[in-house]
Amino acid sequence: MIRLLIADDQAVVRTGLAVILGAEEDIEIVGQAADGAEAVRLARAFRPDVVCMDIRMPVMDGIAATREITADPDLDVDVLVLTTFDVDDDVFAALDAGAAGFLLKGADEDTLASAVRSVAAGEGTLDQRLTRRILHEFVAHRRVRATRSDQHRGSSVLTDREEEVLRLLAEGLSNAEIAGRLFVEPTTVKYHLAGLLQKTGSRDRLQAVLWGIREGIVQP
């Protein structure tokens, strides 16, 4: 069962998300927060698996709340940012704060539930309407290091096989699909994935891909 906390300053949105996602057999709504500060407090109190976080909220916005939650060593909580606003800076800020996913509120019910499951599984998610543009803009916005020495520095952190897994993650492949591509067992992929997540300091697959883009290992 996925334990879910919903944070949004609009009561009607909180209620709607609770009704939609709470109807799923594998999702349990453990709390609702009206602002970022309350989201942090409830995350520490209820220890959900995932927080659905709005960005623009009073008292403390969703970016600051996400940063506090993901930086807390006593919490093992992933954040899925839900927002009405299709703004690149919001996406960058959310991902930099440690969000494991980003979805526009216009997504349908199945997409919402799928995104929660993906984030809970450590796979991360980006709205399909944003993915291609955001990855390209992420590169331009962050000005990926282009010198040979910098690229070598980034690459030296990972083994050759871990780099292969990272590049296949960037293609959106599942563990089973990566295993098929590399002609190895899925358990072997999980081993290499765990290694690259640890070495890159990434919470999930999405954060690892963004790290790879920064380091010039992955080309979107």
Image (spheres, rainbow, N blue to C red):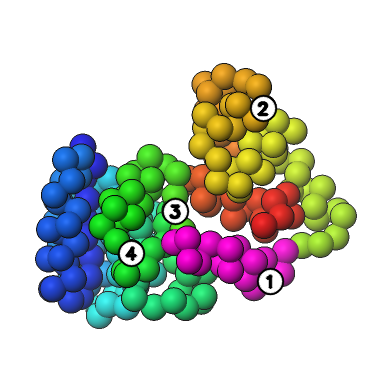
Mark 4 touches mark 1? (CB < 8 Å): no
Of residues 150 and 170, which is closer to you in this image? 170
Q: Which callout, 2 or 4, points at the residue further toward the start of the chain?
A: 4
Q: Which residue is mark 3?
A: 125
Q: Which residue is mark 1?
A: 140
* Disc number lying in front (4 or 3): 4
Compute the Cα span from label 1 to label 2: 30 Å
Q: Residues within 10 Å of mark 2 (few under 14, many from 20)?
A: some
Residue 206 position in % (x across, y down): 51, 50
39 relative position to 87: left or right: left
Q: Give the amino acid at mark 3.
A: Thr
Numbered badge on residue 5: none
Residue 215 can be seen in this image: no
Mark 3 touches mark 1? (CB < 8 Å): no
Quadrant housing the C terminus: bottom right
Compute the Cα span from label 4 to label 1: 27 Å
Image: magenta residue range: 127-144
Compute the Cα span from label 2 to label 4: 34 Å
Q: Give the amino acid at mark 1.
A: Ala
Q: Which residue is mark 2?
A: 182
Q: Give the amino acid at mark 2.
A: Leu
